Image (cartoon, rainbow, N blue to C red):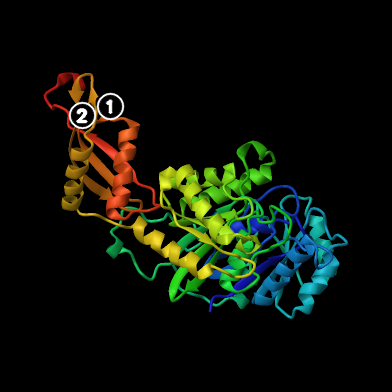
Amino acid sequence: MTAIVALVGRPNVGKSTLFNRLVGKKLALVDDRPGVTRDRREGDATLGHLRFKVIDTAGLEEADRDSLAGRMRAQTETAIAQADVVLFMIDARLGITPMDQPFADLVRRSGKPVILLANKAEGKKGAEGIIEAYGLGLGDPVPFSAEHGEGTADLLEALVPFIADEPEDDDDTGWEDAPEGEDEEDIDPDRPLRVTIIGRPNAGKSTLVNRMIGEERMLTGPEAGITRDTISVDWEWRGRKVKLFDTAGMRKRARIEEKLEKLSVADSLRAIRFAEVVVVLLDATIPFEKQDLTLVDLTEREGRAVVIGLNKWDLVADRQGLLAELKEKANHLLAQVRGVPIVPLSGLAGEGIDKLMQAVFSAYGVWNRRVSTARINRWLEGVLSAHPPPAVAGRRIKIRYMTQAKARPPTFALFGNQLDHLPVSYTRYLVNNLRDAFELPGTPIRLHRRGGGNPYDKARK
């Protein structure tokens, strides 16, 4: 079993900076203000020859259990319970504060091995704080600088007794590129399907993820915008592996002013780019706001398979009527992903999760679909006969043949003459017919035009 190390301490002592250094990537959001981290985030860490799992936690604060700060503290206490060893971090430049002592008592009562890490110890300013740290009764402090990497050898020496040597594994922090252009049969069936859940703030993304995995893994509550970091969790649905990404809610760009929210949105956008299927979660009580349409369009432009989830369906009175209305509205407003699956669900009540996952795997199958060139060109002959392309400057646009260049998403190459003059309306006509003929509902479709110019035309060289 891989050892688990929890990073614990009051706000703004540098836990997320150390987390990023240990995993070797800037996965956790870092800012000068305290309280940036809210959910606990896990990653595969490397320090010298040691391999272990590290958990970044929210800063410990005294607060009522039902408040947001209290719920954040409960997440941190869960991380301490899971850990094999706790790295208790203090700010060496500030020394011991009144907040440090009760939290030192908390980790001591947990019964877990504790390493006292005096962070921000670079330079002379940290010397006094290191001496003060002895007063916590947690043993000798390890001077360290997460920002500059100073003290790495001392931290390695402190961790060695608690972490067994393991062979080096492939990195799996959650941000590898989603493979593109593969045949469906070439895809490793044991590799987890990457599913990112996006939506406006307070659409219920974290509540849905908690219900799916069956534990209170994500911080939830009535407050909008609780989630800041994109958090990945491994899950299994009907024997199929899934990696779920819970993201921060994304508001209209014009409303995003704070640096921290910009970082959160950038993290969510990155999660979309590295996903295979994106679930756009809508609030069923106020569906298809302008921002919802923007998020679907963004997912389509990134070339990811799309599923629309109508959350809070338990609050809807006329369910059948509203569902029919929303499906009709989706075909009108989201023509670029016509036929996109729309699944009513309730993350709070746990309704519709099976149907959502069925839609996710179905959309993934469509996203991977390949069509033979012979079938495509038989279809092309029919659509050209029914509706030939228009003439340009008295010359007819000639379309000779078409082939599928790749899948993930389905991408087709169209060959002929004067294709640069092909009207957008005619391209849309071809794409819509492709959807209907080859059963490609809701998935992004790419249509690239390839000219057949005269190789002896010197003007084109």
Residue type at numbered disc 1: His
**Mark 1 — residue?**
421
* Residue furthest to the left: 456
Work out whether 293 lies above or below 109: above
Residue 291 point in image, percent of width and height: 58, 44
> Which quadrant does the C terminus fall into?
top left
What secondary structure is marked by label 2?
loop
**Quick check: marks 1 and 2 in contact, CB under 8 Å?**
yes
Residue type at numbered disc 2: Ile
Numbered disc total: 2
Residue 409 point in image, percent of width and height: 35, 51
Residue at horizontal 51 percent and vertical 75 percent from the top: 165
* Residue furthest to the right: 98
Q: Real-space Cα distance between discs 1 and 2?
A: 8 Å
**Mark 2 — residue?**
397
Residue 214 point in image, percent of width and height: 60, 74
Residue at horizontal 68 percent and vertical 38 percent from the top: 257
Badge 2: residue crowd in 10 Å (few <14, some 14–19, many ≥20): some
Badge 1: residue crowd in 10 Å (few <14, some 14–19, many ≥20): few
